[in-house]
Amino acid sequence: MFALAHVQTVQTANLLHTVFPRNPDPVPFQEHVWSGRDVGHYRHVRSQSGHVRVLGRCIYSPSPPSTFRVYNIFSQYFLVTMFAFALLLIGFVNLSFSKTVHYDWDITWVTASPDGFARPVIGINGQWPCPQIDVDMGDRVVVNVYNALGNQSTTLHWHGIFQTGSSTMDGASGIGQCPIPPGGRFKYDFEVRRLLFLPLAKILTQKQINQPGTYWYHSHNMGQMGDGLRGPIVVHDAKAPYAGKFDEEITMTLSDWYHEQMPNLLNYYESTRDENIRGGLEPDADSGLINDSQNVSIPVKPGRTYLIHIVNIGNFAGHAIYFDGHPFTAVEIDGVYVEPRFIGTQNIRIATGQRWSFLVDTKNSTDKNFAIFATLDINMMFPPKGIPPPGYNPNITAWLVYDDKKPLPPPVDIHGFDFFDEMNLVPYDHQPILSQVDHQIVVNTGFANLSGVNR
Ligand SMILES: [Cu+2]
């Protein structure tokens, strides 16, 4: 320990001498010949330049008489040295526990038919749905992107990740970065933290993720997330309040889905055609998806507790979701731990971009499989009455499958929802709601019809 401290001390002192050459006393310590009984005692010392250094302490002693190094414990050098040593130590500890999660991603067109209608979708390395990113707290994420689309530029945005101090990695096209042109490359390399003192945090934490919970990534260019370029991110935390209380993890995605490609839909949405035909409403989704598919089987084992992450990776419509016979206990929402909250038989509403994590206990027997029911928010999609056109199916079914040889039962009929109110969730750290407002600024927003187009 001391040997390391000494080495580091010398380096730091030299560095300081270089940076602050006008310091009247650049020599931090001196060689003195002291007797052994002085070890640990405070003494006056005089530096080589003759400057008196008040009290010093001998902290190193081979058998006397010998040469000691005397530190002035009040010296700026000593304090800086100890501080640098602490940073070095913390940095070393951090490095030994964190890792870099590295991806090489070619963004490519893929043909897929998640609801039975085949269309080009945007995938990664020739695969679609896009892969989930799994990282642990303290990890650094490096994603080398190559735009192999040929006909569209692209970016990747990491939804919910704060990108504090790394806004150029945020992926918002035209805001944080230029879009990556076809044939272009971009290296995303980001750190996530809630610490306030950034330069210090940077030294202390290297490039770390310390936002735990559920997130997702998506293209932030040309509406491409609606063409498939999106996937979940889960930041695992060994110190989560629910750590040790679950056996396995499952991630589920929810999405609205469109048969037309996004550039066409965006042109339509921002045209007088849409205004004339539908009063400027957003284009209708053709269907809804669970896990970028429909009628998916999610295998589960009996007598287990699952941590289930649910992400709405869609474009516009919110979802309602219900697991038959399997009540949820909410433990995280949008990357914030909450006091475990038993939702019971109430329904969950998930807005676009929103994330929840639930603990769900499975049944003790494998006698039966259970339906999962999700539906697009038709109130939002078909205002003002929330009545879809005849034949429109906003519903999606999946199953918790205990035994794949047993039948997959149809979902129960639901004629109305009893939604759980998220305002009843309590943050795990009990951070109080801001209450006293000193000054209020009211900003009204609304739609306007400009040149015959809803804006
Ligand atoms: Cu987003």
Image (cartoon, grey):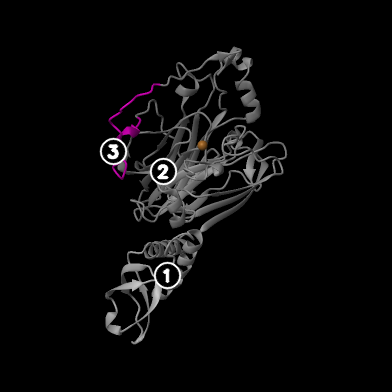
Q: Amino acid at mark 2?
A: Gly
Identify residue for label 3: 432
Q: Are marks 3 and 2 in contact (CB under 8 Å)?
A: no
Q: Amino acid at mark 1?
A: Ser
**Relative to 79, is 142 on the left or the right?**
right
The main secondary structure of the magenta stretch is loop
Callout 2 crowding tier (Cα within 10 Å): few <14, some 14–19, many ≥20? many
Q: Amino acid at mark 3?
A: Pro
Callout 3 crowding tier (Cα within 10 Å): few <14, some 14–19, many ≥20? few
Identify residue for label 1: 49
State the CA–CA distance, disc 3 to disc 1.
56 Å
Which comes before the other along the chain, label 3 or label 1? 1
Q: Which mark is residue 183?
A: none
Residue placed furthest toward the front: 50
Magenta span includes 238:
no
Q: Which of these two is toward me, 325 or 14?
A: 14
Q: Nearer the viewer, mark 3 or mark 1?
A: 1
Q: Nearer the viewer, mark 2 or mark 1?
A: 1
Q: Nearer the viewer, mark 3 or mark 2?
A: 3
State the CA–CA distance, disc 3 to disc 2.
17 Å
Q: Are marks 2 and 1 in contact (CB under 8 Å)?
A: no
Q: Position of residue 324 (x, y in %)?
A: 39, 38
Q: Which mark is residue 335?
A: 2
